[in-house]
Image (cartoon, helix red, strand yellow):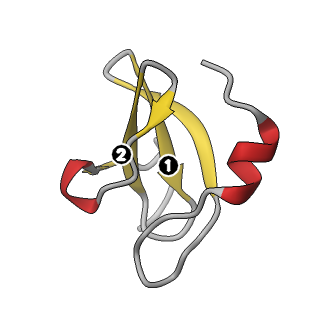
Amino acid sequence: MSLDPLLLEILACPCPDHAPLREETLDGAPVLVCESCGLAFPVRDEIPVMLLDEAKPFPAPAGSAS
């Protein structure tokens, strides 16, 4: 998956912090992960689904303290 960089610049997490997003994969599926709250939003047919009801927690990288 490779979303348009301009789109990624415009999109923000719908949580109150409105943090930037980064592209990742979760269980082999493309997602956008919030830099602040760590929620992963699915990308279906190259369209980000920016609904809090659709988001899932993104696991922290191994070795990071939380």
Q: Which circle marks residue 63 in the picture?
A: none
Query: Is 44 positioned to the left or the right of 35 in the image?
Result: left
Q: Position of residue 47 (x, y in %)?
A: 48, 31
Q: Residue furthest right?
A: 6
Q: Position of residue 63 (x, y in %)?
A: 50, 47
Q: Position of residue 21 (x, y in %)?
A: 60, 54
Give the residue type at disc 1: Val
| Residue at image mark 2 | 59
Vertical placement of residue 5 versus 37, above or below: above
Q: Residue furthest left?
A: 53
Residue shown at 43% from the left, 18% from the top: 45
Q: Pick the quarter of the image with the C terminus.
A: bottom left
Q: Secondary structure at mark 1?
A: strand
| Residue at image mark 1 | 33
Vertical placement of residue 13 versus 22, above or below: below
Q: Residues within 10 Å of mark 2 (few under 14, many from 20)?
A: few
Q: CA distance from mark 1 to mark 2?
A: 10 Å
Of the pair 56 and 48, the residue shown nearer to us:
48
Residue shown at 38% from the left, 15% from the top: 28
Query: Is 23 positioned to the left or the right of 49 in the image?
Result: right
Q: Secondary structure at mark 2?
A: loop
Q: Position of residue 40 (x, y in %)?
A: 39, 47
Query: Is 38 positioned to the left or the right of 35 in the image?
Result: left
